[in-house]
Amino acid sequence: MAGQWSRALIIIFLIFLLSLAACAFGRNGEFSKVKGAKLSESARVFTIVNYCKQTIWPAVTPGENFNGGGFALKQGESKVFTAPVGWSGRIWARTGCNFDKNGNGTCQTGSCGTTLKCSASGKPPASLAEFTLTTMDFYDVSLVDGFNLPLVVTPINGKGNCSVAGCDGDLRPNCPKELAIKTNNGRRTIGCRSACDAFNTDEYCFRGIYGNPVTCQPTYYSKKFKEACPGAYSYAYDDPTSIFTCSGTDYVVAFCSTRKQPVCSYHDRKLVCSASKSIQDSVGKNGFIAILLLLLLSTFNFRFIL
């Protein structure tokens, strides 16, 4: 009798979990949409995530809504911020930093001076995420100032084009030697300079006769950058494949990620994930619940007697 009651209680618990899963997908098989104010008028939630195998020091300018513009993120950590509509700025990561208890120090890449909290742009090379928040947001990942870390921007729960911007690869291992920034001992490449920063010519810096979209064309070096980061700016007039729009969205800014990696944002007491729709498309709502049931049953190692 006791064994039957135990099985009954576990089955009730399973049904409860399945009902939660079904609610998560909602009536149309998607996660619930954020309610309340119009999406295009609400503040944007930014989740900044470190998937790198090292501590990084993200920087934001203007940084009033982002912990003053600078903070540390250990491997696997994330921080959540809110920015108002009207904010326009950039986010990047600094590497190899050493700050004292007062927030003073130096970094190997991306340094904005000698302080933890940034009020100025980062020193190249640095991979940049750029945003302009309006009724229709504009965002991109830019390598025009060089590359120091893979960087991906994923919009979540928005309307419009809402494509994922950024990198699928790491430029550092294959950075042309004439662009490479190495550690002091010369053993490891920690950044890849832009051709403009390295050579300072009109062709690479988009100046003079190269200062327009007709004459400014991809170069050998910008093509290398584009191969690693097909969803990022590789030169000044790379607009058609690199700048994206989305309305009323939250953003996940992920370092050392890929464009296909699922990410989540917590907004209005709801967890919204970029992979929710792709999971549904692959197996369907009922299929997902069936898979969940099978996983749970295998976990408890049930034996049903028919």
Image: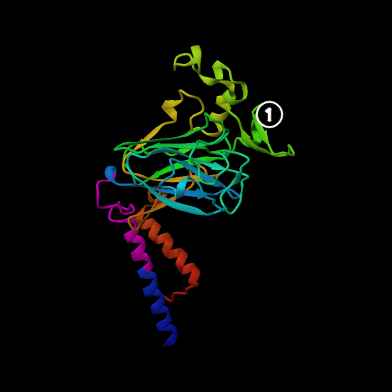
**45 lies above or below 207:** below
Q: Is residue 34 magenta?
A: yes
Q: Residue at x 59, y 20 (%)?
A: 200
Quarter-of-image position of residue 17: bottom left
Quarter of the figure with residue 248: top left
Instruction: Specify the color scheme.
Output: rainbow
Which of the 4 quarters of the picture holds residue 177? top right
Q: Position of residue 26 (x, y in %)?
A: 30, 56
Q: Position of residue 169 (x, y in %)?
A: 57, 38
Circle count = 1
Amino acid found under the numbered disc labelled 1: Lys
Residue furthest bottom in the image:
1
111 and 276: which is toward the camera: 111
Q: Residue furthest top?
A: 209
Q: Position of residue 282 (x, y in %)?
A: 41, 49
Q: Position of residue 174 (x, y in %)?
A: 65, 33
Q: Name the element at disc 1.
A: loop
Magenta stretch, residue numbers:
17-39
Depth order, front residue of 234/86:
86
20 sits to left or right of 238: left
Q: Residues within 10 Å of mark 1 (few under 14, many from 20)?
A: few
Q: Is residue 97 magenta?
A: no
Q: Is residue 14 above or below residue 174?
A: below
- Which quadrant of the rendered structure holds the N terminus? bottom left
Q: Quadrant of the C terminus?
A: bottom left
Q: Is residue 275 above or below residue 206?
A: below
Extreme front residue here? 102
Between 272 and 177, the one nearer to me in the picture = 177
Residue at image point 45% right, 50% down: 67
Where does label 1 land, which residue? 177
